Amino acid sequence: MIAPRMDPIETARPEEVEKLQLKRLRWTLSVAKKSPMYRGKLDAFRHSSMRKLEDVLDLPFTTKDELRQAYPYGVVPVDLESIVFFFHSSGTTGKPVSVFLTNADITRTSRFQIRGFLAAGMGSKDRVQLIVAPAMGLLFEIPLHRLGAMTILSGPGNTVAQAQLIRDLGVSCVFGVPSYLLHLVEKLEGETSVKKVVTLGENLTEAMRRRLERMWNVEVYNDYGSTELCAGFLECGEHCGCHVFSDNFLVETVDPKTGEPTDDRGELVFTTLYREGSPLVRYRTGDIVRVERDRCGCGRTSPRLFFEGRIGDMVKIKGSAVYPTTLKDAMFSIEAVSNFQFVVSREGSLDVLLVRVEAKRPSEALRAEIEERVKAACNVTPRVEFVSPGSLRGERKTRYFVDLRQDA
């Protein structure tokens, strides 16, 4: 049965959506080429020459390095007086990846974010605690307010105060990084008013989802987002992928090495279709995803994203290909483990895989179980070191995988 209160575009036929996407793609090109970053890069492409949606494949990619080089205003195609919002990620190169929005952009973003929140069953009765950075919190607050929900923008950190707010205010929904939410729930004793948890900012594995559901006694919704999107693609109640807002973003997958189109599994590439402050054309995210385009059980026809990892995540340890996500899933499946961190180092010419473990009751039996689960996941037997509770948690989230061979 189709859920109530859906926007018509959410259940539109593919040909209707593609017609709108093509119209907005042409608009995006006409706007983007006015920016310093795209001036020259897009001059050879007239927006009127986009006769079908597949013509987007003729356009050049945009990379993260280009965005950094364009800092601060190289991506902006409009008068700076029109810009009202700036959002950026903290980069290690000294130049951040930045997004700029106009008032019209904020209105559009709010409209489609409302659709995502409705898909996750949120509404005017909710009290939503946002344990996120203030800038991102603002982009959540505006659409939540328009739904009539109460918001508590508590920001990251200060776990004791976060738990007290949940108790005092009768919070029904919490947004946060999954590893931090696993830590926060330990400060909440007994039943709470929380009914939903929305995870963002970190890959949510299935074992992590199950642990969150059990420890919080809630329904968990995953949200795929990024600075460059300046938005989040949220799961619906079917929990079968994160719904893309197709009227605002055109998504593709490409081979991460060649850039050639792939059959809905590969590196995610997106084009903004209705953003004037900082439009992006065929932006390479570096994320490996799977896309499903059939009708969801909720009735929506929009594509659904399944995040699988980051390009470059795979490392070699003792000749074996190891994926951090696989290791995380193995550890979260062990109930006795509270927290953990994998550390790869080299002793002489040999690789060493150490797993540092927080556990309430360390034992030799638990050590043996960890060794067995990790070896089954990556064909490498780890060393296991039990550490004091709370010692592995960072300010906002746990750093689950450290490769000292790269950091050296």
Image (spheres, rainbow, N blue to C red):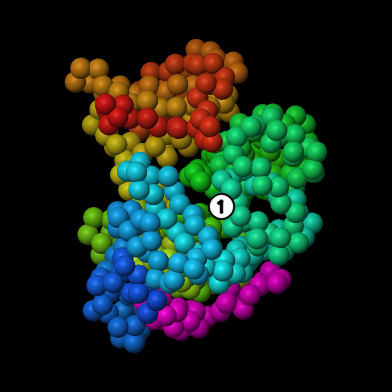
Quarter of the image that includes the C terminus: top left
Residue 264, placed above or below residue 347: below
Residue 25 in picture, x, y percent from top left: 40, 78
Look at label 1 and name its amino acid: Met
Give the residue drawn at x 59%, y 48%. Answer: 134
Q: Is residue 13 magenta?
A: yes
Is label 1 in a helix, a strand or a loop?
A: helix
404 up-or-down from 9: above or below: above
Q: Which residue is mark 1?
A: 136
* Tally of numbered discs: 1
Q: Nearer the viewer, residue 158 or 195?
A: 158
Q: Position of residue 168 (x, y in %)?
A: 80, 38
269 with respect to 115 (left or right): left
Range of magenta residues: 1-29
Which residue does the image show at 35% across and 56% down from the upper left?
A: 71
* Point 39% across, 49% down: residue: 96
Whether residue 249 is visible, yes or no, is no
**Left or right: 172 as drawn, with respect to 56:** right
- How far across and how far down the image is residue 289, in percent? 41, 55
| Depicted 213 relative to depicted 302: above or below | above
* Residue situated furthest top in the rendering: 364
Q: Quadrant of residue 255?
A: bottom left
